[in-house]
């Protein structure tokens, strides 16, 4: 039996990666241009403002291999137990991915008949070339940094959701992205909602082992046409030795609404750039973030609310809790273009520090070039109130139980915004499991 040599993140590895794929010429050209872009870019340095608080000196990309076709016998049934969001939920369709390889795709016939597309992004690059070519990497900045350029060059096992004009998918769709220990995930998620379309997408990222290592180098593009409505829930629980880098962007057009809820609790180190562009009058976005860290985890989110049209509203609320020697970084910006009059922008980050050696960095910002706007921002950082702990213990609770209740209450404002009961319960349970006794 011959053993296939794994390809590294270098020129020779990229050439092998390209040779192993049967793809349209336009996609191969896009990959090659992105790889050349990546080679021309230096790795981020700590002196750059964006990386000032995130140290990646321990990250060595050559420890990981480029995605390649799976030769194992792992099935979607073997990995489904790691998921939480779809318990008790009747789904319209499911996609299961392991180490950048799609294992299973399903979509109910009733939605196929209405023109909904849900499945492998790579396959749809051929079967629906005009649609995918128009939108793939159309809103992402592949030259933002070296990570973004590499992802654009070597993404694999991507997923696509396309909902035609006026179609309302009233059942959630589910994507499961899973990493084996030491695996690589470079999946790209492309979501396109045409005029008046509606959908709910549940996307969770898990490792097979709690302390599993690996690399996630991913991207998300959400493109919403006028009058569309999307609820997107993303739960990230990669193994605690996994490096996670991602570019996530949404573009919301006239009178469209986006509710984006994320929970980040996994990985050794996470650095995510998340942005929402409001490009049509009346566009509305609500982004809810939950971050919970332990041990020596480092999770950093940089968010941007970019108002490019008048009469738009954006609401960003991030809540973070840190224990042990962990650290979170949130750096947010509301940017208002000169034409974006009547803007209503809000951003807030609250932190609950559960250990004397944990740390939370919170940096809100405003960049306003219009003169008729309402933009507010805020940030708080505090420890658990000892009076609340004492009050609970007087009623028979242990200190750990009291702390768990206080932490759950701290995140309740986020949970209350989630309209799917099972998802709200799953996120609450995931956080409660991680709370240890407050020192």
Image (tube, rainbow, N blue to C red):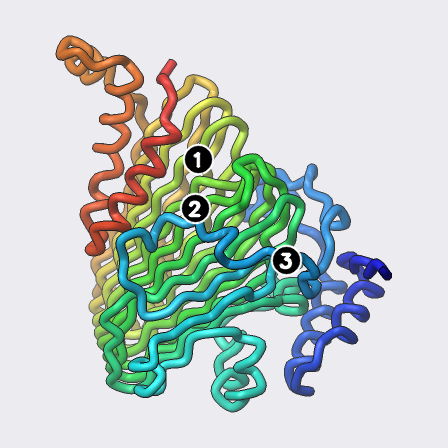
Above or below: residue 265 compared with residue 179: above
Mark 2 lies on a secondary structure that is strand
Instruction: Give the quadrant of residue 371.
Output: bottom left
Task: Find the distance from the CA under tag 3 to the CA under tag 1.
Answer: 44 Å
Residue labelled with disc 1 = 361
Q: Nearer the viewer, residue 171 or 129?
A: 171
Q: Point out which mark residue 11 bears.
A: none
Image x and y of residue 149, in percent: 64, 65
Marker count (numbered): 3
Return the disc, 3 or 2, that comes first in the chain's sequence. Answer: 3
Residue labelled with disc 2 = 331
Image x and y of residue 96, in percent: 49, 62
Quadrant where the image shows the C terminus: top left
Residue at the spot 59% in from the left edge and 56% down from the top edge: 74
Above or below: residue 206 compared with residue 220: above
Return the disc, 1 or 2, that comes first in the chain's sequence. Answer: 2
Residue labelled with disc 3 = 73
């Amino acid at each position: 039996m011959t053993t296939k040599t794994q390809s590294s993140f270098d020129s020779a590895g990229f050439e092998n990666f390209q040779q192993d794929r049967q793809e349209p010429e336009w996609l191969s050209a896009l990959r090659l241009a992105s790889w050349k872009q990546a080679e021309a870019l230096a790795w981020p340095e700590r002196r750059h403002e964006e990386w000032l608080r995130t140290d990646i000196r321990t990250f060595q990309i050559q420890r990981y291999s480029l995605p390649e076709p799976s030769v194992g016998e792992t099935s979607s049934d073997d990995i489904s137990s790691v998921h939480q969001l779809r318990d008790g939920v009747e789904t319209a369709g499911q996609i299961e991915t392991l180490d950048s390889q799609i294992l299973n795709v399903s979509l109910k016939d009733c939605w196929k008949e209405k023109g909904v597309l849900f499945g492998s992004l790579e396959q749809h690059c051929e079967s629906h070339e005009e649609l995918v070519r128009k939108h793939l990497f159309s809103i992402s900045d592949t030259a933002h940094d070296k990570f973004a350029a590499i992802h654009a060059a070597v993404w694999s096992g991507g997923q696509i959701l396309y909902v035609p004009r006026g179609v309302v998918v009233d059942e959630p769709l589910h994507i499961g992205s899973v990493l084996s220990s030491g695996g690589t995930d470079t999946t790209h998620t492309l979501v396109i909602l045409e005029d008046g379309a509606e959908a709910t997408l549940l996307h969770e990222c898990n490792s097979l082992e709690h302390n599993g290592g690996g690399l996630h180098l991913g991207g998300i593009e959400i493109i919403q046409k006028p009058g569309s409505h999307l609820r997107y829930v993303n739960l990230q629980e990669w193994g605690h030795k996994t490096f996670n880098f991602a570019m996530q962007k949404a573009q919301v057009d006239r009178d469209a609404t986006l509710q984006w809820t994320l929970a980040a609790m996994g990985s050794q180190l996470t650095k995510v750039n998340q942005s929402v562009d409001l490009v049509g009058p009346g566009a509305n976005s609500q982004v809810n973030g939950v971050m919970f860290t332990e041990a020596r985890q480092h999770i950093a989110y940089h968010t941007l609310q970019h108002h490019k049209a008048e009469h738009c509203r954006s609401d960003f609320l991030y809540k973070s809790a840190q224990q042990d020697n962990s650290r979170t970084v949130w750096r947010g910006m509301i940017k208002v273009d000169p034409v974006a009059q009547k803007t209503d922008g809000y951003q807030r980050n609250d932190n609950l520090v559960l250990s004397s050696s944990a740390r939370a960095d919170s940096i809100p910002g405003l960049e306003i070039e219009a003169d008729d706007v309402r933009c507010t921002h805020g940030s708080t950082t505090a420890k658990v109130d000892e009076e609340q702990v004492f009050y609970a213990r007087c009623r028979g609770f242990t200190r750990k139980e009291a702390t768990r209740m206080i932490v759950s209450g701290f995140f309740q404002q986020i949970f209350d915004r989630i309209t799917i009961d099972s998802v709200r319960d799953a996120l609450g349970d995931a956080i409660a499991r991680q709370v240890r006794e407050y020192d």
